[in-house]
């Protein structure tokens, strides 16, 4: 236990509150939204470039959530069928090489179909194959 003299010298530090990085979800694990616009992120204008040393075309969508927020969400996996006005489910989780992209679209739910011909890493909305 500190003495009064020690507390005068160095006051107690207040406990810092954890910053919520997915405010648009309003405390929910996922939120439904409607795609407003789809981008392929590259070096073109109106796009986001991957940070150094990465490069490549990243698929993202502008989504209006049921919470009223308009966010940029990453579409994971190879190929997608999403288009304007598609209903999508969005979860938190930033994309490390895209600045400002803090959400991901959940594949295999609503209008976002799973990745075709996926055997391993089935977190892309693919059903497990039945053993023969």
Image (tube, rainbow, N blue to C red):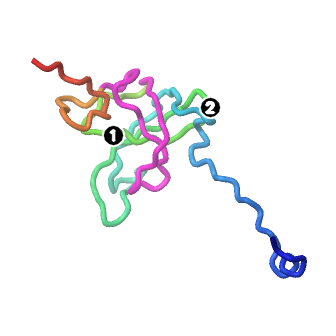
Q: Residue at x 34, y 25 (%)?
A: 108
- Residue 31, x across and y down, in percent: 53, 29
Q: Nearer the viewer, residue 45 or 4?
A: 4
**Label 1 environment density (alpha carbons within 10 Å; few <14, some 14–19, many ≥20):** some
**111 in the magenta segment:** yes
Q: In the rendered image, which quarter contains the C terminus?
A: top left
**57 in the magenta segment:** no
Q: Residue at x 13, y 20 (%)?
A: 131
* Residue range highlighted in magenta: 86-113
Q: Is residue 119 left or right of residue 114?
A: left
From the viewer's perspective, is the residue at label 2 or at label 1 nearer? Answer: 1
Q: In the rendered image, which quarter contains the N terminus?
A: bottom right
In the image as oriented, which residue stretches furthest toward the front?
A: 1
Q: CA distance from mark 2 to mark 1?
A: 23 Å
Q: Quadrant of residue 10?
A: bottom right
Q: Which residue is mark 2?
A: 68
Q: Which mark sits nearer the N-terminus, 2 or 1? A: 2
């Amino acid at each position: 236990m500190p003495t009064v003299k020690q507390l005068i010298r160095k006051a107690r530090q207040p406990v810092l509150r954890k910053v919520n990085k997915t405010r648009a979800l309003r405390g929910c694990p996922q939120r439904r939204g409607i795609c407003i616009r789809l981008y392929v992120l590259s070096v073109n204008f109106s796009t986001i470039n991957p940070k150094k040393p990465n490069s490549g075309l990243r698929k993202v969508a502008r989504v209006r959530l049921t919470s009223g927020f308009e966010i940029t969400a990453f579409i994971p996996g190879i190929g997608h069928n999403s288009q304007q006005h598609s209903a999508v489910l969005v979860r938190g989780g930033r994309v490390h090489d895209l600045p400002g992209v803090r959400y991901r679209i959940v594949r295999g739910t609503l209008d976002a179909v799973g990745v075709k011909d996926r055997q391993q890493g089935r977190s892309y909305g693919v059903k497990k194959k039945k053993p023969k």
